[in-house]
Image: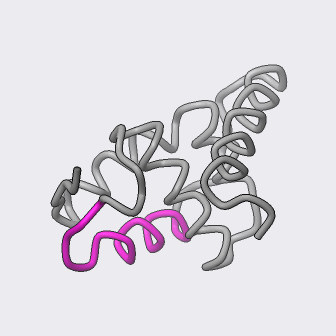
Amino acid sequence: MEQTFTPQQIVEDATTWFMSYSGTYARLLKRTKAEGKRAFVVFCDLSIGEDYRDVKGKGVKDAFINAFMSSSTVSNITPQQLVSGSVEYNDKVNYYLGDE
């Protein structure tokens, strides 16, 4: 089911997600638009509970990618938590995107 969001809603939710294990892992990856798009897929599933294809709203994907590109690389989680986040992140990327 499609859900419409505003860019502001997405940025607020993304800011919270960036502090999660998978969100922290995402923030530590290369800052490319391609990685931002993968992070958006994971964010949609884990943070807002939606398939990324069902997230609608003018400029929401760009708002997320801009927030991703400018987010801090400071990490407040343990190495074990980071590993947990990387597994969760990569599982979601593989589930939605396969071997792209």
- Of residues 70 and 30, which is closer to you in this image? 30
- Of residues 3 and 64, which is closer to you in this image? 3
- Of residues 24 and 85, which is closer to you in this image? 85
Q: Main secondary structure of the magenta part?
A: helix
The residue shown at (80%, 63%) is 99
Which of the image's four quarters has the C terminus?
A: bottom right
| Left-right relation of 5 to 90 | left
Relative to 77, residue 75 above or below: below
The residue shown at (47%, 71%) is 65
Which percent across, then down, holds residue 32?
Answer: 68, 77
Which percent across, then down, holds residue 51?
Answer: 41, 51
The residue shown at (30%, 60%) is 55
- Of residues 19 and 7, which is closer to you in this image? 7
The residue shown at (35%, 45%) is 50
Which percent across, then down, holds residue 15?
Answer: 39, 47
Colour convention of the picture: one colour
| Left-right relation of 51 to 99 | left
Magenta residue span: 55-70
